[in-house]
Amino acid sequence: MCVDLKAKNSKIDRRALLLGAGFALCGGASFVATPRQTSSRISEVAFQALLPAKVGGWTARVSSDLILPSADALSDKLYENLKTYTYEGPGLPTIMFLIAYSSVQQNDVQVHRPEVCYPMSGYPILDNRPVKARIGNRGIPARYLTADRGALREMILYWTRVGQRFPLNWTQQRIEMARANVSGVIPDGALLRFSTISAEGSNDYQLLTDFAHKMAQSLNPKMKEVFFG
């Protein structure tokens, strides 16, 4: 029997070529589909140095009196940077400030919302409403809450940022992370929280937005990216 080796080898070569092209396409698709981190970690020392020691007539002091998530939730896996300050000034109301930042926000690394950590710490949320906080020339989608502190109330203004967006709830937060991942990006994320303790019935929204505005004016470009993306 006579076998046409040339034709047989040609078929094998074509098959190998097609298989190779298929593997290359799969590899390329996998590369494209793998989200890439776009923000770099900030060391603890550098992060602290970026935060203002003075805001208007207020002076900062490091404080451990703020309401925080449980110790397990504050692992390095959840937050790369977490700072809490109390800002005080002569004749001025005390402002408590918390900032949590991570250069990577994924499904297992989420910014932590006050709606969760306050009730877990024994302070029910009495009111929770979406607001558009005017910070500088920006309108930031944020939330304004009232927490029960016994005879007093803690008024809270906060926003979360995931990449370039400001999700108002947990569902939006996950949607924004998924949106960024699909576009090939692992977004960074931050939570900014401003609060003050007042007598029942007090409305301190303007106080907190004014303070946040003054703080934003004193930030350098790197920390403005953390605040606003």
Image (cartoon, rainbow, N blue to C red):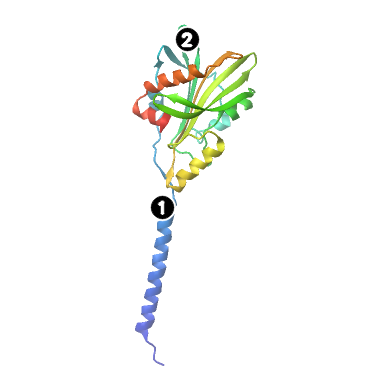
The part of the image, by quadrant, that contains residue 40 is: top left
Report the residue at 39% width, 66% height from top: 20
Q: Which residue is mark 2?
A: 92
Q: Position of residue 146 (x, y in %)?
A: 59, 21
Give the residue at the far top of this rendering: 91
Of the two numbered discs 1 and 2 on the same chain, state the one appearing first in sequence.
1
Is residue 227 in view from this perspective?
yes
Question: Can see residue 106?
Answer: no
Viewer-side residue, 44 vs 111:
111
Q: Residue at x 39, y 78 (%)?
A: 11
Instruction: Classify mark 2: residues with Cα within 10 Å, few (<14), some (14-19) or many (20+).
Output: few
Q: Quadrant of the C terminus?
A: top left
Specify the quadrant that holds the N terminus. Answer: bottom left
Taking the spot 56% from the left edge, 32% from the top edge, the residue there is 73
Image vertical order of residue 17 relative to residue 103, above or below: below
Q: Position of residue 177 (x, y in %)?
A: 49, 41
- Type of residue at label 2? Leu
Q: Name the spot of residue 151 as percent of width and height, x first.
A: 64, 13
Q: Residues within 10 Å of mark 1 (few under 14, many from 20)?
A: few
**Left or right relative to 172: residue 163:** left
Q: For numbered disc 1, what is the local secondary structure?
A: helix
Left or right of 49 in this view: 149: right
- Viewer-proximal residue, 53 or 169? 169
Provide residue 24's location: percent of width, then percent of height: 39, 62
Q: Residue at x 57, y 29 (%)?
A: 71
Secondary structure at numbered mark 2: loop
Q: Quarter-wise, where is residue 5 in the image?
A: bottom left
Give the vertical position of 148 relative to 90 (above or below).
below
Disc 1: which residue: 32
Q: What is the distance, in whole Å, between disc 1 and disc 2 at their CAs?
A: 53 Å
- Disc 1 marks a residue whose amino acid type is Val
Q: Which dot marks residue 103?
A: none
